[in-house]
Structure formats: C-alpha cells, structure tokens
Amino acid sequence: MFKHEKLNLLIFIVLVALQLLGVIGLLTRFQLSYLPIMLSLFFWGGMSTTLYLHRYLTHRGFEMPEWLKFIFATGSAVTLAGDPVTWVGDHRYHHLKSDTDEDIHSPLHGFPYAHMMWLIRKPPGFRERSKRYAADVRKIWYCRLWEHSWLYILPHLAVAITLYFTLGLAGMLWCLYVPMLVIYNVTWSVNSICHMPKLGYRSFDTSDRSRNNFWVGVAGFGEFDLTRYVIWVLEKFGLAWQVVWPAKVSLATGLRPVHPSHPASVAAATFGATRSL
C-alpha cells in the first residue's frame, strides 16, 4: 500500500548518514576506555525503545515514576529512535493492520521496505493519522515538544558534542553512533526478519506472520527478555507498579501457545521479543 509513495529524500539522507557514522566508527581504532560509555549508551538507548516506547508508552504494560519516564524518553531522543508520538502512533497502527496490505511495515511489501524504507515512504497525511492513534502520548509535555524536530535533536546533539570534546572523533563514533547503528538495525529487523516465515519460530498462534528470532531477540533485549527482568527489578524497588505480567494476559486473551513448555511462550503475549520489539 505504501511502498510506492514518494521517497522523503531528507529523511533518507539522515538515516543513511547516521548509519554511515556507525560504520566509519567501526573502522577507527577502538580503545578499551570507550567500552563502559558505549555499553551504557547502548543499554540506555535500547531500553528506551523496548521498555519505554514499546512496553510502557505503546502498550501501557506498567506504570513508573515521572522522573524515570523522562530519563527513558530522553534516552530515545539521544539515539534518535523517533519522536514518541510518531513512534507510538505508527506502532499501534501496525498492530491493527499487521501483515496486511495496509501494514505500514511488512515483508509482504518486500524486505527493504519492511526494514527501513517504510520510514521514508509514508504517504502525505499519515503523520496526522499517527497523532490520532497516539492522542494520549501528546498529552505528555515533552513528547508534544519533541514533535518539533529542532527540539527533538537537542539531547542527541548535547551527547554527541560532549563525547567529541572529551573523547575525540573516534570516541564519539564508537560510543554513540556504533550503538545507534546496532539499535536501528535490530529494531528494524523485528519488522522485517521477524515477520518472515522461514526465519523464526512461533510461540503463539496469532493472525499475523510474526516470529521470534533468537539472534534478533538477544540483541533487542527480548529472547531472554532482559527488558522483562529490568521491569521486574524496578517493580521490586517500587519503581514500577500495575505491571501486566504475560501469564495473566495469555489466559485473559485466550492466546494459544504453539510450544507451551517454551520459556518464551509466556513472555510473547505481552512482552514479546519482537516489535513488535
């Protein structure tokens, strides 16, 4: 439905440039001192996508303090994961139309489109549709502000400039853009690889073509469900509450496990390893 829409050249250039910075970083000399910062930004950015944008903001699977929400929201801005209103609106629409001709990102329209090209071929007016699906998110003041691109990129620029002047060009590339390269392609792989029948397994019978893929799941904090354990720890410390745990949801929704004994079968209902992520 969407793959023949006009290409947004500006967004295409930005996405390619951000990934090229990550690739260039891989070609520069790595220093062990980069590792703690690189892993911290990877964890912050990854959790900001899986825990905040997906499990909290899109599906409202739990509640947490306002200050913690802002930390995770800022992490998503640092890695330029997508402004929360658009991210949530697009993803809720995807769930409604998953793997149909109207799905905004499905391998039914080809692997390149499902992986990245959907981001730059949205039809005119689709953003307004996303806003309607994410009306609740627009009530959050910083999410509403970050609909303006020039405000949304400020956290990213602040981190990039700080890293450049403290660690140099190579340090900035390794610590920020290499993690972003991984986060982007893991997230996009959930839309592409994890909806291809021959590239994964199913824990539940669902109406779409979604699959769990071991390697995508591990990199996306899903296969061993690191995000789930982070939420569990937050709950134990009183930083998460009203948590909707998957076992209860699967019984309530009547989802039928394909492999009932598989440890991922329970997690897939609400906290599945795919984006679906």
Image (tube, rainbow, N blue to C red):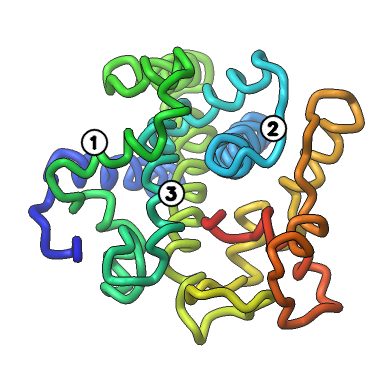
Residue found at the far right of this picture? 236
Q: Nearer the viewer, residue 51 or 102?
A: 102
For mark 1, give the secondary structure: helix
Q: Which residue is mark 1?
A: 128
Q: Of the residues shown, which amino acid type is indicated by label 1? A: Glu
Quarter of the picture containing the N terminus is: bottom left
Residue 40 is situated, as x and y percent measured from the top left of the image, at 66, 32
Front label number (3 vs 1): 1
Residue lying at 44% horizontally and 47% vertically, measured from the top left: 181
Front label number (1 vs 2): 1
The label on residue 91 is 3
Is 62 placed left or right of 117 in the picture?
Answer: right
Circle 1/circle 2 CB separation < 8 Å? no
Question: Few, some or many C-alpha atoms within 10 Å of disc 2 (few <14, some 14-19, many ≥20)?
Answer: few
Separation (CA) of disc 3 from disc 2: 32 Å
Residue 147 is situated, as x and y percent measured from the top left of the image, at 32, 23
Residue lying at 87% horizontally and 24% vertically, measured from the top left: 238
Q: Does residue 119 sit above or below 265 in this rendering?
A: above
Question: Few, some or many C-alpha atoms within 10 Å of disc 3 (few <14, some 14-19, many ≥20)?
Answer: many
Q: Which residue is mark 2?
A: 36
Q: Nearer the viewer, residue 264 or 247?
A: 247
Residue lying at 48% horizontally and 18% vertically, measured from the top left: 140
Q: Quadrant of residue 132?
A: top left
Q: Counting residues from the N terminus, which is met first, the one under dot 3 or under dot 1?
A: 3
Residue 252 is situated, as x and y percent measured from the top left of the image, at 75, 60
Question: Few, some or many C-alpha atoms within 10 Å of disc 1 (few <14, some 14-19, many ≥20)?
Answer: few
Is 160 placed left or right of 270 in the picture?
Answer: left
Q: Counting residues from the N terminus, which is met first, the one under dot 3 or under dot 2?
A: 2
Q: Of the residues shown, which amino acid type is indicated by label 3? A: His
For mark 2, give the secondary structure: helix
